Amino acid sequence: MIFQRALQRELASAAGATFTVLFSLIVTWTLISILGKAAGGKVASSDVIALIAFAALNYLPTVLILTSFISVLMVVTRSYRDSEMVVWFASGLSLARWIRPVLTFILPIVLLTGVLSFYATPWAKQKSGEYAERFQKREDLQQVSPGQFRESASANRIFFVEGVSGQSAVVHNVFVNTVDDKGTATVVAKEGVITTTPEGDRYLVLKNGRRYQGMPGSADVQTMEFERYSMRVASKAQELGGTLGVDAMPSPELFRGTGPIIHGEILWRIALPITCLLLPLLAIPLGFVNPRAGSSSNLIVALLIFFSYNNLVKVFEGSVRQGRMNFALSWWPLHLALATVIVLMFAWRLNVNHRYHPRVLWAAFKRGKGPAKEVK
């Protein structure tokens, strides 16, 4: 019990430090990406905080998997490096006794990963898509940022405003350039506002400005001054959620659906909690290290295993989405293979006196006698 409590505290401490570093990196990378989109006018600046939260929630299952894997590996490696495992084995205890406390530590993380995978992450993707869709479906002037040129939804009109006041889309010092069959029309005005007619049509009403009409390269240019000038604003339908991606579908709806794309998404969601369970168990035999050698190689190997396994899951998911593999025959073989590797590595580590065990081979090499005989 003393060992288990001490191990739980050390695992929690390692997991807290690892999660803080990984989550900070993810949030920083997401912040840079979304701020770049906001600066380019692809998302609204007022939605940046919400989009960062949704993106962080989307990456959280992967962060939790890597956190549990690295934290268990770091604790086991430290025990070998500080020769605590020598005392552990000398007391007649085996490496398999680590399984129970490690499972006690990771099972809450596995449950949290499952909840995130099946419920929170699809919701975050759905809300993020709604924010982006809502921004794209706003009226042209509502998408304009002060000091930036913005193309209209119909791609034949360019807006530029110097300032925006209030929440009613009132803009100041407006420049509008329109290209149509009649030529190019340029309108400048001191003020503009969007109004809605009783029929539901939206118009941009400009006040106190000028309009220039003519063909490019022609000297025939018409000039008109006005106190009030209206032009129809090209706007899209305001209904949201018309096209919901499969990765944003709620899990109950996803499990009721059929088709290779839906099966591929189900495979990915199932794989996350299973991976979170298997990789920390792999870290127990993988954490072996010679106390006289460095321990950084274990961490490098762990990262390679994590990314390779994650990419293999993606390969299986892509094959199911494309219809090249059957879902019933593809969601479990990779996880079964990893579970088999874990069992074999435990068997290898437990049989420390086997003639091909690294400790026996190293002792034989130093003696210069080749492979040693199995110790009785």
Image (tube, helix red, strand yellow):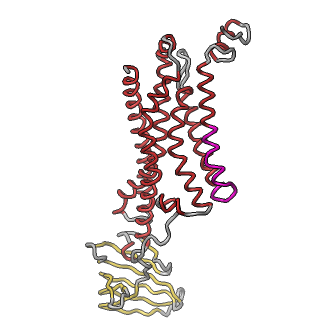
Q: Nearer the viewer, residue 154 or 259?
A: 259
In the image, residue 222 above or below residue 111:
below
The stretch in magenta equals 319-337
Q: Residue furthest right?
A: 370
Q: Residue furthest top?
A: 367
Q: Residue furthest left?
A: 166
Quarter of the image for the C terminus: give it: top right
Left or right: residue 94 compared with residue 222: right
Residue 185 position within the rendered picture, expressed as x and y whole percent measured from the top left: 45, 87
Residue 365 seen in the current view: no
Quarter of the image for the N terminus: give it: top left
Left or right: residue 194 compared with residue 341: left
Residue 245 position within the rendered picture, expressed as x and y whole percent measured from the top left: 51, 64
Instruction: Tell me what residue is drawn at x 46 percent, y 26 percent.
Output: 75
Q: Nearer the viewer, residue 150 or 209?
A: 150
Q: Quadrant of residue 8?
A: top left
In the image, residue 81 above or below residue 132:
above
- Does the magenta-highlighted stretch encompass residue 97? no
Instruction: Tell me what residue is drawn at x 53 percent, y 23 percent.
Output: 96
Residue 177 position within the rendered picture, expressed as x and y whole percent measured from the top left: 44, 81
